[in-house]
Image (spheres, rainbow, N blue to C red):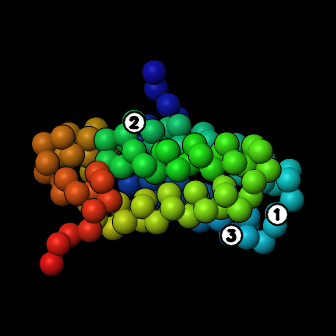
Amino acid sequence: MTTAGAGPAREILPRLHTQLNILVTVLALDGNDTELATMFAGLADTAASAEPLLACVDPVVSLEIRSALTHAGRGHRDNARSDLLIASHRLARLLRRTPRSLSTSQMSVAVHDFGVDPDVRFGVSGSS
């Protein structure tokens, strides 16, 4: 099965991060329900496309997004915003620590071969 966002990781993850940040802001500003429904639908599509990659590098991002979508569906905006904010922060950390030139398949192989810092998978900061 091929997804629309199965392109390079440098494209799907930053797009997902941007969507998360926009939704966090709109939820804080109390956007209208039609606008939010459209934005959450777009987020769900992008997250589904990024799911295979996120499962390898930081599955918590996907869990937080799914939780946010559930909260949004129930009208719990504050809870949805909180989950989206957590996902956004974890994804930002991942994007800062991952070489942007890797494709999705290369990144998956790198993670499995520990060519990328294995702590990235679990959101652990480097020890110093």
Given the image, on which type of amino acid does mark 2 rest? Pro
| Dot 3 alpha-carbon crowd within 10 angstroms: few under 14, some 14 to 19, many 20 or more | some
Given the image, on which type of amino acid does mark 3 rest? Thr
Rounded to the nearest angstrom, the CA distance separating label 1 from label 2 is 30 Å
- Lower position in the chain sequence, tag 3 or tag 1: 3
Q: Residue drawn at (48%, 45%), measured in percent from left and top?
A: 62
Residue 24 percent location from the top left of the image: 65, 65
The residue carrying mark 1 is: 31
Report the side of 108 relative to 72 (left or right). left
Given the image, on which type of amino acid does mark 1 rest? Gly
Q: Nearer the viewer, residue 70 or 39?
A: 70
Q: Answer yes or no: do the residues labelled 1 and 2 have beta carbons within 8 Å? A: no
Vertical position of residue 95 compared to residue 115: above or below: below
Residue 113 percent location from the top left of the image: 13, 42
**Location of residue 32 (image quadrant):** bottom right
Circle number at residue 52: 2
Q: Residue drawn at (20%, 69%), measured in percent from left and top?
A: 126
Q: Can residue 98 be seen in this view?
A: no
| Dot 2 alpha-carbon crowd within 10 angstroms: few under 14, some 14 to 19, many 20 or more | some
Q: Is residue 116 visible?
A: yes
Q: Residue drawn at (38%, 54%), measured in percent from left and top?
A: 10
Q: Residue drawn at (57%, 43%), measured in percent from left and top?
A: 66
- Lower position in the chain sequence, tag 1 or tag 2: 1
The residue carrying mark 3 is: 25
| Dot 1 alpha-carbon crowd within 10 angstroms: few under 14, some 14 to 19, many 20 or more | few
